[in-house]
Image (spheres, helix red, strand yellow):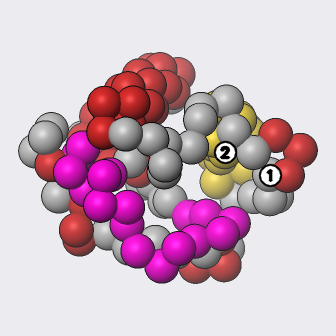
């Protein structure tokens, strides 16, 4: 969802990548539904591992709530957003996390 919000709010001025240290191989149906409510089609995305992102030094790398277990990604700036994993939440709680992610992405984009 963060990559989607970077695409939406970055308006083509940023390149965002999303990956997981433990990808499931599919996009969570709740994420697809939550983003669809905002007019964004997540069915065109895929769940990928960190070894599938470009091997470059990124300007910003953001992790979400992994604390000391965060994988290393080369970047000028690293941030960990302590956001709960919404995977097993009901739809209403999932939307709350979606909205938190959107606000965090907007704040990051304002820094750029």
Labels 2 and 1 touching (C-beta < 8 A): yes
> Percent x, y for residue 58?
64, 54
The residue located at (57%, 71%) in the rendering is 23
**104 versus 71 height, above or below:** above
Indicate which disc residue 70 carries. 1
Q: Quadrant of residue 42?
A: bottom left
In the rendered structure, does residue 16 fall within the stretch colored magenta? no
Could you tell me which residue is drawn at 31 percent across and 52 percent down? 30
Tally the marks.
Answer: 2
Residue linked to disc 2 = 63
In this orientation, which residue lies closer to the viewer: 12 or 63? 63
**Residue situated in front as seen by the camera: 66 or 10:** 66
- Which region is colored magenta? 19-35
Task: Look at the numbered disc 1 and give the secondary structure of its residue.
Answer: loop
Q: Is residue 48 in sight in this rendering?
A: yes
Which sits in the foreground, 11 or 62? 62
* Image-based side of 99 in relation to 25, left or right: left
Q: Is residue 91 above or below residue 4?
A: above
């Amino acid at each position: 969802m963060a990559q989607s919000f970077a695409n939406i709010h970055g308006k083509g001025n940023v390149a965002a990548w999303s990956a997981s240290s433990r990808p499931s191989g599919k996009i969570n149906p709740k994420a697809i539904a939550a983003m669809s409510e905002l007019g964004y089609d997540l069915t065109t995305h895929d769940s990928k591992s960190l070894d599938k992102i470009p091997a470059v030094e990124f300007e910003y790398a953001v992790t979400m709530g992994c604390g000391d277990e965060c994988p290393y990604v080369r970047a000028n700036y690293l941030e960990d957003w302590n956001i709960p994993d919404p995977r097993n939440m009901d739809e209403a709680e999932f939307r709350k996390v979606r909205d938190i992610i959107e606000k965090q992405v907007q704040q990051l984009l304002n820094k750029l």
